[in-house]
Image (spheres, helix red, strand yellow):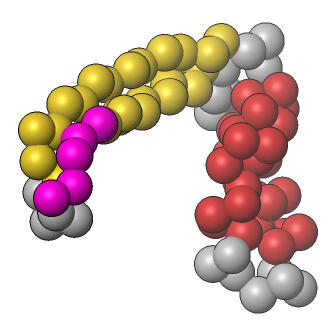
Amino acid sequence: MFSEAGLIDVITRRLIWKHSFEDGGKAYDFFASTSSAWWYSKFPSDKIPSVAQKIRYAFERKPVTEITMDVILAHGHKL
């Protein structure tokens, strides 16, 4: 991806960390606050509340108590 963007001498670093939560509701609140910007844009605005509620229910029912973050940082030079 970086080469296709015209970068050379690309250096990458992958960071992974985990967040633990007491329950699925708190895990969902964190998930929604950090990632909802991109997935909200995929739904019509009148559907967002019901979709968010379904996702929250799934987090609580499972229960999801850990969220893993995976980020790749890259640095390169453009010709």
Identified at 28% across, 24% down, the residue is 13
Residue 9, quarter of the rendered image: top left
Q: Is residue 46 left or right of residue 34?
A: right
Where does the image place residue 2, in percent across and percent down from the top left?
A: 20, 54
Looking at the rendered structure, the number of numbered marks drawn on it comes to 0
Q: In which quarter of the image is the C terminus?
A: bottom left
Farthest-out residue, front: 79
Identified at 89% across, 69% down, the residue is 49
**Would residue 26 be seen by someone viewing this image from the given angle?**
yes
Where does the image place residue 25, in percent across and percent down from the top left?
A: 83, 32
Q: From what the image shows, is residue 72 above or below residue 67?
A: below
The span shown in magenta is: 75-79
Where does the image place residue 43, in percent across and percent down from the top left?
A: 70, 81
| Residue closer to the observer: 67 or 74 | 74
Q: From what the image shows, is residue 41 above or below residue 1?
A: below
Q: In this view, does 68 lie to the left or right of 58?
A: left
Q: In which quarter of the image is the N terminus?
A: bottom left
| Residue closer to the observer: 44 or 61 | 44
Identified at 62% across, 16% down, the residue is 19
Where does the image place residue 39, in percent across and percent down from the top left?
A: 64, 65
Q: From what the image shows, is residue 47 above or below residue 57?
A: below
**Would residue 60 be seen by someone viewing this image from the given angle?**
no
Magenta portion: prevailing SS class: strand
Identified at 23% across, 41% down, the residue is 76
